Image (tube, rainbow, N blue to C red):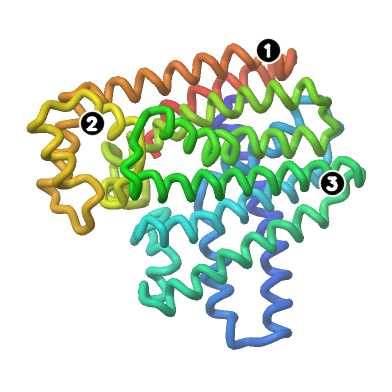
Amino acid sequence: MEFEDYLDVTSKEIEGVLKKFLAAFRKDVNRETKVLLHLIDDLIDSFYGGKYLRGSLVKLGYEIIGSKPTQEILKPAAAYTIVHGALLIHDDIIDQSPLRRGKLSLYKKLGGNHYGISQALVLGDLGFFLSFKLIHSADFPIKYKLSGFDSFIQILINTGLGESLGIEYPKLGIRAENDVLKIDRLKTGHYTIMGPLKLGAILGGADGKLLNSLKSFGENLGIAFQIQDDILGVFGSEEILGKSVKSDIEEGKNTLLIANALRVASKEQKVILNRHYGKPNISENGIEKIKKVFIETGALDYSRQQAVKYIERAKKIIPELTSDPKYLKLLNQLADFLVNREY
C-alpha cells in the first residue's frame, strides 16, 4: 500500500468514529439546551474536511510496533483530529485568517466581531475537552492509557509554548534561524509528527528506546513539514491550500524565508521587507515585492534545501522504528509526501 492510500483509508475510518462520537455529543447538548445547537453544528462542521494526517499517524504509530490490531486505536486517532481542529480555530484568530479548508474560518463564520471571536475561542476550548473524553473512552491497559495521556498533554503544552513564541518573537524583533527552528520543533515537530506517532506507540506498549527514536524522527520530519508549510504559505495556491496566502506575511510570521532574507538582503531589499512584512492589509504589489526578495536573496532555495536536509535526517532514523518492509515503505513515503505536498 502507498502512503497516500493508507492516509485515505485511515481517514475514512477516523471520520466514521468522529461522526458517531460527535453525534452523541450533539445529543447531549440538545438535552441540556437547544440554544447552542447552531454553534455546536458549526463546531462539528469545522472538524471535517482535512486530511486527518495527525490522526492517521496515531494509528500508524500503533501499528509499526507490531501491536495487535484493534478498532480502539481509532478513538485516540479521532481525538487527535478533534484537538487539531480546536487548535486551528484558535490559530485562525491569532493569524486573522478569513479562510480554512476553503470555507470561512469559524470566527469569521460567526461574524468576525467580538461575539464571533469570543464564541470561537470557547468552542475551540470545547474541542480540547472533547479530545480528552474520547481518549479516556478508549479501551487500552490503564498503564498505557495513563502514559499516553501524559504524552498527549505534554505535546499540547509544547505546542502552546511554540505558538506563544511565534507571537512573541516578531514583537521583540527576533528572527534568527535558530529561533525559527525552535518554534518549528515545538509547534510542529512535536505536535504534528512525533506526538501522534508516539501516542499510538505508547498505547501499543512501545519501550523507551523506540520512543526516543520516534522523538528524533518526529522532530526532524516535523521541522521539514513546517518549512514546506511556510513556503506554501507565501508561494502556494490559495485555491489548493484552502486558506489565505497573505496571512503569514501580514502576521509577520517567523520563518526561514524571512530569517534568511533579512540575513543576506541588500539595503534596498531590507527596506522592502521592513516596509511590507508584518503589515496588515498588504497590497498585492507589496506581496509580490516580498516574494521577489525571497527569491533574489536565495531565501526560497535555502528553505527548500533545509527541508530536504531534515527529511534526510528523518529517513536515516526509520530503520530504528521498524524492520517490517510494509512500514519501512510507508514511513519513507510519509517523509516524501510531507515535503513534496502542495497543500
Q: Amino acid at mark 1?
A: Pro
Q: CA distance from mark 1 to mark 2?
A: 38 Å
The tag on residue 262 is 2
| Label 1: few (<14), some (14–19) or many (≥20) C-alpha neighbours in 10 Å | some
Label 3 residue SS: helix
Q: Amino acid at mark 3?
A: Leu
Residue at the image position 12 percent from the left and 39 percent from the top: 272
The location of residue 55, given as percent across then percent down, is 64, 44
Residue at the image position 49 percent from the left and 33 percent from the top: 182
Residue at the image position 87 percent from the left and 49 percent from the top: 139
Of circles 1 and 2, which is in front?
A: 2
45 w.r.t. 220: above or below = below
Quadrant of the frame with the C terminus: top left
82 w.r.t. 271: above or below = below
The location of residue 100, given as percent across then percent down, is 41, 56
Disc on the earlier residue, 1 or 2:
2
Q: CA distance from mark 3 to mark 1?
A: 28 Å
Q: Disc 1 designates what residue?
A: 319
Label 2 residue SS: helix
Please give left or right for residue 251 compared with residue 328 in the image.
left
